[in-house]
Image: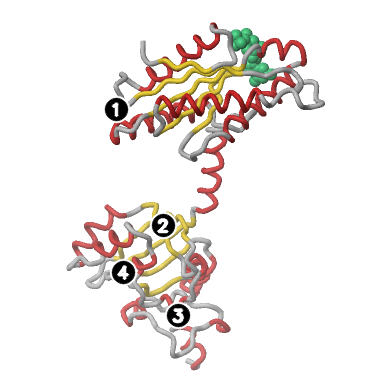
């Protein structure tokens, strides 16, 4: 056999076209890996091509979790050259708590223990820290090749695009299309969470229910498209007055909005409601636009709970509703507080 043909047979699984072969000084896989992962036959050569072109990161780890082989997509995912990756601990590329979890897995004293425990840790979604410091969400699957000194096949799939799409869809499902504030579903979820958190920490929790006054008249006089424009302007006025990102403005339904104010007591919530009322009243009047010249006002009901003395969070909303009703029958364009039923 010619020397070049012999050399060809001795390529490890991660072999590249000859132009990108590692230099002789580059770190080489464990001899055991080399012994098992030589290529020569046409079938093995096909497998080498598949591994080099498959768009998932494929790594071979020894039983201590040290990287023995990596395919080109793996290099791309880790943002590092394979020569630098070979021999390094795979778990060192992971973010805590996964780095601890997998370091502990690879510290098993016997191959049998490792084989038994590997199923508890795969498949799984974990976070990878690339060489350039970027964090990437990945899905991993670990399989064991049983032997006295077992090897592990680690397949990693980049979830970034999927995560981005998922986050965008989630955001859409929680946003009111017309006004771009949170919708009722998001309001209920956040209020439930804040209720639980404030119960634990004994901080007050307040809610505002806001209803536009005589909105039907505005719709009837100027049409629903102009009504929509007012809804958008009022939503953004409410949002702009919230001093903390933990506070949430939502469209509660029709021409009603709601605000969650974690950490706000009765006095603070009432003062903020008054600021919002004034801001909305100031939206109309000064503009040339016929709708903007139409007087706009809102009525607001305020309710607060401290140490969660109420039955549940819906009782807080009911109290704000009672206060809102009071504001309406007392002449509108005002803030009312309900201390309890
Ligand atoms: N333009 C527009 N109007 C809406 C929307 N949702 C609800 N409305 C209107 O809001 C109006 C609510 O009318 P009412 O419940 O009678 O209340 P109001 O006229 O504001 O009277 P008070 O609340 O008692 O001051 C109705 O005319 C609905 O058609 C919407 O998305 N866009």
Residue ID for mark 1: 307
Which disc is residue 27 wearing?
A: none
Which disc is residue 127 wearing?
A: 2
Counting from the top left corner in percent of width and height, residue 318 is at 42, 15
On screen, residue 179 versus residue 291, left or right, reads left
Q: Residue at x 22, y 57 (%)?
A: 116
Tell me which label, 3 or 2, sits earlier in the chain.
Answer: 3
Q: Nearer the viewer, mark 2 or mark 1?
A: 1
Residue ID for mark 4: 65
Label 3 and label 1: CA atoms lie apart by 59 Å
Image quarter of the C terminus:
top left
Cβ atoms under marks 4 and 2 closer than 8 Å:
no
Q: Is residue 228 above or below residue 146?
A: above
Label 3 and label 2: CA atoms lie apart by 23 Å
Quarter of the picture for ligand 1? top right
Residue 319 location, quadrant:
top left
SS category of the residue bearing label 4: loop
Label 4 and label 1: CA atoms lie apart by 50 Å
């Amino acid at each position: 056999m010619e020397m070049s043909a012999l050399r060809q047979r001795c390529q490890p699984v991660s072999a590249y076209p000859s132009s990108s072969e590692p230099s002789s000084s580059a770190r080489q896989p464990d001899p055991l890996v080399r012994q098992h992962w030589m290529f020569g036959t046409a079938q093995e050569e096909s497998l080498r091509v598949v591994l080099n072109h498959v768009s998932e990161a494929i790594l071979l780890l020894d039983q201590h979790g040290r990287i023995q082989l990596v395919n080109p997509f793996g290099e791309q995912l880790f943002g590092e050259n394979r020569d630098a990756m070979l021999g390094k601990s795979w778990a060192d590329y992971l973010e805590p708590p996964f780095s601890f979890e997998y370091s502990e897995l690879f510290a098993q004293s016997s191959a049998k223990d490792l084989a038994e425990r590997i199923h508890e840790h795969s498949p799984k979604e974990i976070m990878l820290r690339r060489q350039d410091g970027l964090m990437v969400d990945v899905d991993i699957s670990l399989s064991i090749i049983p032997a006295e000194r077992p090897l592990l096949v680690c397949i990693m799939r980049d979830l970034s695009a999927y995560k981005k799409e998922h986050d965008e869809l989630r955001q859409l499902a929680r946003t009111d299309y017309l006004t771009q504030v949170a919708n009722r579903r998001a309001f209920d979820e956040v209020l439930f969470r804040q209720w639980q958190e404030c119960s634990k920490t004994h901080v007050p929790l307040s809610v505002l229910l806001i209803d536009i006054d005589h909105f039907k008249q505005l719709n009837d006089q100027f049409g629903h498209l102009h009504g929509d424009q007012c809804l958008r302007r009022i939503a953004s006025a409410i949002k702009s007055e919230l001093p903390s990102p933990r506070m949430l403005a939502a469209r509660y339904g029709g021409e009603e909005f709601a605000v969650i104010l974690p950490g706000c007591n009765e006095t603070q919530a009432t003062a903020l409601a008054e600021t919002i009322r004034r801001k909305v009243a100031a939206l109309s009047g000064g503009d040339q636009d016929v709708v903007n010249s139409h007087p706009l006002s809102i009525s607001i009901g305020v309710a607060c709970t401290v140490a969660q003395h109420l039955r549940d969070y819906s009782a807080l909303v009911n109290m704000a509703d009672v206060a809102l009703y009071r504001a309406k029958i007392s002449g509108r364009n005002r803030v009312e507080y309900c201390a309890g039923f």
